[in-house]
Amino acid sequence: MKRRGLCLVLAAPSGAGKTSLSRALLDGDEFMSLSVSATTRAPRPGEQEGVHYYFKTPETFAAMIAAGDFLEHASVFGRSYGTPRAPVEAALAAGRDILFDIDWQGYRQLRAALPNDVMGVFIRTPTLADLRTRLIGRGDDAATIARRMAEAETELAHQTEFDFIIENRDFDVALTDLRAVRRACRLMTSRLA
Ligand code: 5GP
């Protein structure tokens, strides 16, 4: 059977475990790859051009918007982020799935751009107190924690716009849930080409 590729969006408040879950989901899955976004923020230590992001100047980013190079773009934490259009369209046409680590604004736009090809998963901790504990545990400073907690409330306000909500209480259980979602999405009748 021939099937169309799927865009699986993972969104979460910062610190909810999204990055670890998406890495684990991609690990050994030859049918799915990660969409690499463009951003105007500076690279963090260890981040590589074209692997974690395509790092752009604000001027280049604006020119890419004008040229229609993005499927979606948004301003997050005062920086610009966007999903390059060409690799996504090529993957979908080839029947390959793509995982997106974008925020709720990007999810809305992506859904509007590709109404039949996008499924959204929101990952959260059971409570905001759990989120704070995780942010403290990973060594963020007090100001960063305060900012991320405020942003988490904004992100959480949009959780019901997603098709699935996974509570990351235990990593292995959350990963099992995420794999189940991905597998179910793959088998949907609507994915037949
Ligand atoms: P960070 O700078 O920590 O890598 O990412 C900050 C936020 O930007 C995260 O919530 C991430 O999901 C979001 N983000 C990353 N890439 C994109 C993108 O291409 N589009 C949108 N809308 N959000 C993105």
Image (spheres, grey):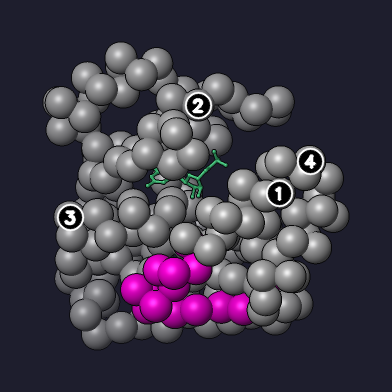
- Real-space CA distance between mark 2 and mark 4, rounded to the nearest whole angstrom: 19 Å
- Image quarter of the N terminus: bottom left
Q: Which mark is residue 113?
A: 3
Closest to the observer, 113 or 128: 128
Q: Residues within 10 Å of mark 2 (few under 14, many from 20)?
A: some
N-terminal label among 2 and 4: 2
1 vs 3, front mark? 1
Residue placed at 23% from the left, 44% from the top? 71
Residue placed at 48% from the left, 61% from the top? 155
- Left/right placement of residue 173 relative to residue 2 reads right
| Disc 2 element | loop
The reply to whether discs 4 and 3 touch (Cβ–Cβ < 8 Å) is no
The reply to whether discs 1 and 4 touch (Cβ–Cβ < 8 Å) is yes
Residue placed at 26% from the left, 70% from the top? 3
Q: Which mark is residue 145?
A: 1
Q: Residues within 10 Å of mark 3 (few under 14, many from 20)?
A: few
| Disc 3 element | helix
148 in relation to 133, above or below? above
Q: Which residue is mark 4?
A: 141
Quarter of the image for residue 43 reads top right
Q: Which mark is residue 109?
A: none
N-terminal label among 2 and 3: 2
Q: Which residue is mark 2?
A: 41
Where residue 69 appears, as percent x and y from the top left, is 21, 32
Closest to the observer, 35 or 125: 125
- Image quarter of the C terminus: bottom left
N-terminal label among 4 and 3: 3
Quarter of the image for residue 104 reads bottom left
The reply to whether discs 2 and 3 touch (Cβ–Cβ < 8 Å) is no
Where residue 138 appears, as percent x and y from the top left, is 81, 50
